[in-house]
Structures are given as structure tokens and as C-alpha cells.
Image (cartoon, coloured by chain):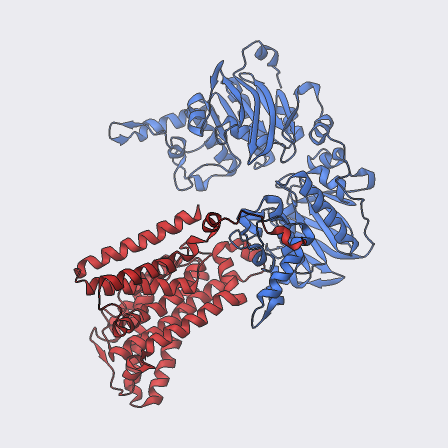
């Protein structure tokens, strides 16, 4: 790749981000971040999940409002209050989930909200012609009249990019543009980036794939826990450095002493396959251990857990619990096998937000409290037990879950599954969006459970969490288990190497 | 202070604070009913006469029974537009069966059992189309609403179907302890439904499914089964209502029996504070909603307001109820 960055730096920065702070209900997620972005460069933004990458880019594109700090665009102080004002400046963001309307065709989407008309009617001819021109410039063969629903993911991305170009974009922000693409599509995407650069467009993008970032970017911004760690020329940093800078801090006592399980397997999964998602998954969970699942988003970790729990149809695969082959076709079957699964999507899949604490905790285990009718007193007593055990903070035990903080919601979620008295506990991103103190509480609680003989799987995108908790870590990539790490091998470098496909 | 009291937030116990914490939205239907009763008593001297009151209750009991079933459907996140047509079809078939069976109480009992079974079966058909065929409940029941009404007209040749059984009118026209039988039936069913919704695992599951079906399925709840059964409950209620209505009149006119009952039932459920989006609601709220609608109708009659304007008032009441609910949600 040609590095025209020296030439670039002689220009004035197109965008100056100065001391940006962002708080969500009092919790600071971005701490005085200052970055200059130069015209025509490709700027990569790296960081662990929760480091503040998406938040930063959403502020730049007007989706979020900054709490304090200033943004200058082409030398002018600007306030970016909404996506429309960002667009007016020439800043566009392509989100991970595309904003395309499936029932409209390519050119209609490209001109959505920006339609050309000749007096009274839409000037379809002009829009179609302009679309053809843009697509030709992007060197893509796409029919302007093709329906979005018939396009591949990569083609949809082309449409998004064309949509940004039609509104004369100067800075194009992309959130993990390559995660959804196949290898071949990624190559096409890289070529496209070159063409956009040639057009003078500045690109800012988030990626988790270090190799890719190294290949395509001019400079790299690394964020961690909402702080700017470094801005490096891409030539001055290698992948190992990136991984280290992303993870950063020393591990401290927020993690309890590690436990090591016995040799006795409680859960054995063999030859699990789901077409297009999972390839030949084999693993064992040993009694009393904490087994970590690492990997990038979309590597198939959640899908593995859901398949094991009967939430997804398996194409093939065998599950053994305590040495006995079991058929799990529904969550109810999994519960009967003493298995529990806390989804990463606490609010969307885990808790009934307009139920109170009591009703959420007893939702799965309700049969325990029923003698003809629900024995409300027994149900409440048990909920009070968990409130005390987990130190759940709420106005009252009858508070609806939507009024609890994320950490307390997570504790209720844990209580809900603990009430089914599981032996195997699968935790998917158990501390996502949770403050460090509650994290610590949850870690120690997980640890206590294993002392009582429970076996735990932790799926996490926070390397630090896996390194601190797990006695064994399986790394997944693109639907396969690609590595197993134990002891001192469980470190961020090893995990990242496997996860990013360097090993 | 013990550990358990830690979760109780310490808050100022001033009267104002208590007033602010009072769950106004929850009790809004009850408060509205009390205000309406007082206002009606003041506005018309005929209103508080026992005979007028029992009349109001009887008039609302037919749609009231249906509204009980509708409450389950709506809480689970659905809607059933076919109940009005279903009342007519079940009513017509019930009387036709009765006339075929002949006179006497045995025939009446058999016909009632058949009517309830038919209601359940029709509800099950709705439920199957919706859960197995994955059709939105609004569309599915819009279709069955049309189908059932047309079948009613077809089997009856669009003519009034009159019962020849001498005992039948005593079912819906009878009194017990001075109160009409349909009112007793409505009250008993309301109690049963309340217990079912509030105090059984099934009721809990209905609320969970309506609030978030994904969470429910991740919580080992048989979402489709629960959703399906709410339509069966609605059908059973329709069957019972059809028996009450047809026995009271001793006949069913296939064209207008049950006309717009679905709208009255939905209105009552919404006025009673059940969220149209599903997930929360109460039976007692629905009962109050039913009575509020009945009193408003009654008062408009007593006060001599044009019958043409009654729909306007009903519409405004529904709007106010929904606006109040919406405010509570924010």
C-alpha cells in the first residue's frame, strides 16, 4: 500500500476532535478524547468491546451528542446535533446493520430522502443515470433496478457507500465494515477503499481484525475504557503491539483465585454443525471449571451456546450431559438437563422488562411455587433471598426491571437462572455494559459457584475477563474452534493471534 | 436495620410524596368509574334506581364476557376481530341444534355444551392460523370475521332463527336473587379469569409472551402454545356469550347479532388499562371498562342525547383512556 500520509499531514486536518467527553446517565464512557483527522487518510479505530469506539463514531455522525468538548470541521467549529447536520457537513456513517429498505430497489435507496424531481414527479431517469455513474466509478456491476432484498451483503454495502457518495461525502465512517464480508468480498472492499481515497474521501473505520487494519489503514487510533491510548502511524506498530495496547492494564484483584476443575466431563459436545454458522464443534466442559470462549464478534460463540441450549436447530451434533447422551430440542429440555444460559442480550432475550424482580426471578422455575395456584409468599421469599445474596439494589422488590441499572438487571438475570438450580451455567458476555464494581461481584460469585461443583462456560469478548477467570480458553473463528489455551498460554497475545487468524 | 429492608428505598413520608407515589395509572379506570357513577347519579334521578342498574349490567354482560377472553388475547400481544361474527354463528347453530333436539332442559344443556365447544373450536381455528400459519392476528381474524358472518347468513338463509324450546329463554332471561343470570355468569367468569390471569403459571406466561416473546422462549415458555390458547379462551367466552344472548332474545338475527361486539370488547379492554401492545393488563380493569361503557350508553339514553352521537362519546372515552395510558408509559 502506498503511504501518502506525509503528504496528507501537510494539509490542515479536515476534522479536529478536541477533548470529547461522553457520559451516559452519569457514567463516563469517553474521557477527553482528542484526535485530528486528515483529508484523504484511512484512519482505523481499534479497541476492545466497550472501549468507546462506536460511541465516538456515533458522536461524529450525530447519532449521539457529546457531553463536552468541541469538534472542528474544515477549520470551523461545528455542532453536530443529528445525522442530518452531519450529512450536511459531508459526514456519513455506515452502521453495522445497514439502513436500506429491502422493498425498494438500488437507485431508490441511494436517493432515499434525497430524491430528484422534475417539478411534480420523481425524475427516475436522472436518478438511474446518476446511480449508474456512481456504480461505474465504484467499479461494481449492479443493476440500479435490482431490489435490495435480492442483493448479497457486500452488494448492500456498495449501495450504502454509493448512497453516501451521492450526498457528496467528505468523511465516511464505517462500523466494522468487513465483519459481514467473505474473504473475497473483503478484497473487493479494499479495492473500493483505494478508489474512495483517490476521490479524496476520508475514511474512518472500526475493525477487530488486526491484520486487515495493518493492511488498509494509514494511521491507527487505539481506545481503551474510553481513554485514547495512542495514535500511531501504521508502519510503527505491529499486531502484537496493537493487541497489547488494546488490553493494556495489569490484571488486579478484581478476579478471584482461579479454580481448576476435575477431570470428569459434565458436558460433552461432539460434531456440532450448523450450515453457514458452525463447523464441527467439539468440546468438553469439566466439572467445577470455568471454560472460556474467546473470539471476535460473529465467530460463532453465541450460536454454539444457543445450539447446545436447544435455541437453534442443529444440522448435526451430539450432546452428552454427565456421560449420558441427551436430546435437547428446546430450552425446556436444557433446563431439565440442569443447564442454564444467560444470553448476551439481557434486555431483548433475558428479562421481561415490565415484570418486577419477583416475577422475573421465578419465570423459569415457576412450577416450584405452584400448588394449583402460585404461592406468592414462597415466591417472594425466594426473591428476597436472591436480593440479599447478590446485593441487588432496587427501590423495592416490586420494582419493574426497566427501573433497575444494568448491573442490577444482570444480577436479577443470574438469580433467575440460579433458581432453576443448574449444574451447567453458560454465561454470554456476563458483564457487558456493567460497571467495574458489579463486574467484580459477578466474577466472585461465578467463582463461588464452581466451588459448589457447578461448571461454567463464559463467552466473552473482553480478553481480560477470560484471562482473569478461565482455567481453559477455547478460541473460535468463523464458526470453528481454532485453538485451546491453558495455563500461561491464556494471554491476550495468544488469544488475539488465534481469533484474528494469525495462527 | 435488617438486610432485607435495605432494598426498601427510604423516601420522605410527606403526604405529597405519598400522593406522588400513588400508582394513578393503575387505578385510573376505577377512579373514572367512581366519578362517572357520582356524576350520573347527580345528572339523572332515574340512574340509581336498582332496576336501571341491573339493566345496565345485563346489557353489558354479553360484550363483557367476550371482553374477558379478549383481555387474554390482547395481553398475549394479539387481537381478535372475529368475536362478533362468531357470536352470531354460534348463536344460530345453537338454536338450530336446540330445535332439532326438541323441548326440555336436557336439550338445553346439550345445546349449551355444544355452543361452548363450537366457540372453543372456532377460537382454535383462529389460533392455528395465527401460530401455525404465522399470520398476524389482526389479518387472520379480519378474514375469519368475514367468513363467519357469511357462514351465519348462509346457514340461516339470512332469516331470523327462533328457538322452539320453552326452557331456553329462562337461561338468559332468568333472575337469581333479583339479579339477571347473564350478570351472574359474567361475574363468575370474571372471577375465574382473574384467578387464571393473576394466580396461575399460565396467566404469568401469557403476560410474559405478550411483553417479550423472545424472552419468553428463552425462558422455556411454550410461546406458540400460550398464544394459541388465548384464542381458544376467547372462543369459549364467545360461546358462553352467544348462549346468553340467544336465550335472552330466544332468537338470533344472523345479520346484526354481535355486530361491532369486537369493537366494544376491545374498547372495554383498553379503557380498563390493558396495553394494546400486550404484556400487561388486568381482568378487573376490563370489568370496569365494560361497566364504564355501559353507564355512558345508559346515561346518554336517559339524558335524551341523540343516538347518533353516542358513538362520538364512546370514541372520545377510548381516546382519553389510551392517552392516559400512554402518558403513564413515559
Residue beneath the point at 58% across and 33% down: A178
Q: At x 42% / y 28%, what residue is drawn? A: A84
A191 lies left or right of A419: left
| Residue shown at the point (51%, 38%) measured from the top left | A97
Q: Is residue B57 above or below residue B278?
A: below
Quarter of the N terminus of chain A within the rendering: top right
**In this view of the protein, which residue sits in the foreground, A83 or A186?**
A83
Give the residue at the far front of this rendering: B14
The chain letter corresponding to blue is: A
Please indicate, yes or no, whether residue B120 appears anywhere in the rendered image. no
Q: Is residue A478 left or right of residue B225?
A: right
Q: Quadrant of residue B174?
A: bottom left
Task: Give the vertical position of A494 relative to B226 (above or below).
Answer: above
What is the tally of numbered marks visible in this picture? 0
- Can residue B90 be seen here? The reply is yes
Foreground residue among A318 and A75: A75
Whole-percent x, y for residue A120 in the image: 24, 30
The x, y position of residue A395, in whole percent, is 57, 49
Q: Quadrant of residue A475?
A: top right
Q: Is residue B186 left or right of residue B194?
A: left
Between residues A37 and A450, which one lies in front from this camera angle?
A: A450
**Which one of the lettered chains is coloured red?**
B
Residue A39: percent from the left, percent from the top?
Answer: 53, 16
Placement of the C terminus of chain A among the 4 image quadrants: top right
Q: How far across and how far down the image is residue A372, in percent?
A: 56, 73
Q: Is residue A131 above or below residue A411?
A: above
Can you name the residue that lies furthest to the top here? A10
Q: Relative to residue A237, is residue A157 depicted above or below?
A: below
Amino acid at each position: 500500500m502506498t503511504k501518502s500520509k506525509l503528504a496528507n499531514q501537510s494539509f490542515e486536518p479536515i476534522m479536529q476532535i478536541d477533548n470529547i467527553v461522553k457520559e451516559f446517565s452519569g457514567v463516563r464512557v469517553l474521557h477527553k478524547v482528542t484526535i485530528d483527522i486528515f483529508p484523504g487518510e484511512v484512519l482505523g479505530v481499534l479497541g476492545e468491546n466497550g472501549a468507546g469506539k462506536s460511541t465516538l463514531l456515533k458522536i461524529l455522525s450525530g447519532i449521539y451528542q457529546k457531553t463536552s468538548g468541541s469538534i472542528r470541521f474544515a477549520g470551523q467549529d461545528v455542532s453536530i446535533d443529528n445525522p442530518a447536520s452531519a450529512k450536511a457537513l459531508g459526514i456519513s456513517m455506515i452502521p453495522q446493520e445497514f439502513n436500506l429498505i429491502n422493498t425498494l430497489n438500488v437507485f431508490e435507496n441511494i436517493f432515499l430522502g434525497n430524491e430528484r424531481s422534475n417539478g411534480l414527479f420523481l425524475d427516475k431517469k436522472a436518478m438511474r443515470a446518476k446511480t449508474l455513474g456512481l456504480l461505474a466509478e465504484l467499479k461494481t456491476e449492479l443493476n440500479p433496478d435490482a431490489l435490495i432484498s435480492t442483493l448479497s451483503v457486500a452488494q448492500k454495502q456498495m449501495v450504502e457507500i454509493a448512497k453516501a457518495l451521492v450526498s457528496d461525502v467528505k468523511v465516511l465512517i464505517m462500523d466494522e465494515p468487513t465483519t459481514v464480508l467473505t474473504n473475497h468480498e473483503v478484497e473487493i472492499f479494499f479495492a473500493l477503499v483505494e478508489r474512495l481515497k483517490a476521490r479524496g474521501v476520508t475514511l474512518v473505520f472500526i475493525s477487530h481484525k488486526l491484520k486487515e487494519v495493518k493492511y488498509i489503514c494509514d494511521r491507527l487510533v487505539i481506545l481503551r475504557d474510553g481513554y485514547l491510548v495512542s495514535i500511531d502511524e501504521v508502519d510503527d506498530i505491529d499486531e502484537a503491539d496493537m493487541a497489547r495496547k488494546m488490553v493494556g492494564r495489569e490484571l488486579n484483584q478484581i478476579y478471584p483465585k482461579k479454580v481448576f476443575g476435575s477431570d470428569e466431563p459434565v458436558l460433552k459436545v461432539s460434531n456440532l454443525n450448523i450450515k453457514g454458522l458452525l463447523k464441527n464443534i467439539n468440546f468438553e466442559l469439566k466439572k467445577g471449571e470455568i471454560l472460556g470462549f474467546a473470539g471476535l464478534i460473529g465467530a460463532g460463540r453465541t450460536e454454539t451456546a444457543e445450539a447446545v441450549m436447544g435455541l437453534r436447530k442443529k444440522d448435526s451434533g451430539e450432546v452428552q450431559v454427565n456421560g449420558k447422551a441427551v436430546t435437547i430440542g428446546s430450552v425446556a429440555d436444557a433446563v431439565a438437563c440442569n443447564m442454564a444460559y444467560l444470553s448476551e442480550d439481557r434486555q431483548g432475550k433475558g428479562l421481561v422488562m415490565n415484570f418486577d424482580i419477583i416475577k422475573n426471578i421465578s419465570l423459569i422455575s415457576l412450577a416450584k411455587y405452584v400448588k394449583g395456584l402460585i404461592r406468592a409468599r414462597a415466591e417472594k421469599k425466594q426473591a428476597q433471598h436472591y436480593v440479599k445474596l447478590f446485593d441487588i439494589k432496587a427501590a423495592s422488590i416490586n420494582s419493574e426491571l426497566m427501573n433497575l441499572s444494568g448491573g442490577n438487571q444482570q444480577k436479577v438475570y443470574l438469580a433467575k437462572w440460579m433458581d432453576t438450580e443448574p449444574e451447567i451455567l453458560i454465561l454470554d458476555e456476563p458483564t457487558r455494559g456493567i460497571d467495574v464494581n458489579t463486574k467484580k461481584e459477578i466474577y466472585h460469585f461465578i467463582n463461588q459457584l464452581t466451588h459448589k461443583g457447578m461448571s461454567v462456560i463464559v463467552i466473552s469478548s473482553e480478553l481480560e475477563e477470560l484471562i482473569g477467570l478461565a482455567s481453559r480458553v477455547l478460541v473460535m473463528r468463523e464458526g470453528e474452534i481454532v485453538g485451546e489455551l491453558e495455563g500461561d498460554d491464556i494471554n491476550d497475545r495468544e488469544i488475539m493471534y488465534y481469533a484474528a487468524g494469525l495462527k | 436495620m435488617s438486610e432485607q429492608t435495605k432494598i426498601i428505598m427510604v423516601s420522605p413520608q410527606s403526604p405529597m410524596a405519598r400522593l406522588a407515589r400513588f400508582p394513578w395509572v393503575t387505578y385510573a379506570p376505577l377512579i373514572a368509574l367512581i366519578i362517572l357513577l357520582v356524576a350520573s347519579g347527580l345528572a339523572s334521578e332515574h340512574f340509581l334506581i336498582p332496576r336501571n342498574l341491573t339493566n345496565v349490567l345485563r346489557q353489558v354482560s354479553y360484550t363483557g364476557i367476550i371482553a374477558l377472553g379478549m383481555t387474554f388475547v390482547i395481553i398475549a400481544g394479539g387481537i381478535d376481530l372475529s368475536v362478533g361474527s362468531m357470536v352470531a354463528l354460534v348463536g344460530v347453530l345453537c338454536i338450530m341444534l336446540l330445535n332439532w333436539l326438541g323441548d326440555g332442559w336436557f336439550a338445553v344443556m346439550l345445546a349449551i355444551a355444544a355452543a361452548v365447544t363450537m366457540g372453543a373450536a372456532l377460537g382454535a381455528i383462529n389460533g392455528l392460523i395465527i401460530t401455525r400459519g404465522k399470520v398476524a392476528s389482526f389479518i387472520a381474524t379480519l378474514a375469519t370475521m368475514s367468513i363467519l358472518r357469511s357462514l351465519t347468513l348462509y346457514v340461516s338463509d339470512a332469516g331470523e332463527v327462533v328457538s322452539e324450546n320453552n326452557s331456553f329463554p329462562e337461561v338468559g332471561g332468568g333472575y337469581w336473587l333479583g339479579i339477571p343470570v347473564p350478570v351472574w355468569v359474567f361475574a363468575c367468569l370474571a372471577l375465574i379469569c382473574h384467578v387464571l390471569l393473576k394466580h396461575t403459571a399460565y396467566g404469568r406466561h401469557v403476560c410474559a409472551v405478550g411483553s417479550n416473546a423472545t424472552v419468553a422462549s428463552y425462558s422455556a415458555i411454550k410461546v406458540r402454545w400460550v398464544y394459541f390458547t388465548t384464542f381458544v379462551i376467547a372462543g369459549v367466552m364467545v360461546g358462553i356469550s352467544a348462549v346468553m344472548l340467544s336465550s335472552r332474545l330466544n332468537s338470533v338475527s344472523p345479520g346484526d347479532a354481535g355486530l361491532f361486539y369486537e369493537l366494544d370488547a376491545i374498547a372495554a379492554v383498553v379503557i380498563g388499562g390493558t396495553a394494546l401492545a400486550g404484556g400487561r393488563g388486568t381482568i378487573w380493569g376490563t370489568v370496569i371498562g365494560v361497566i364504564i361503557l355501559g353507564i355512558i350508553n345508559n346515561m346518554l339514553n336517559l339524558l335524551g342525547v341523540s343516538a347518533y352521537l353516542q358513538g362520538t362519546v364512546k370514541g372520545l372515552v377510548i381516546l382519553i383512556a389510551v392517552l392516559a395510558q400512554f402518558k403513564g408509559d413515559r
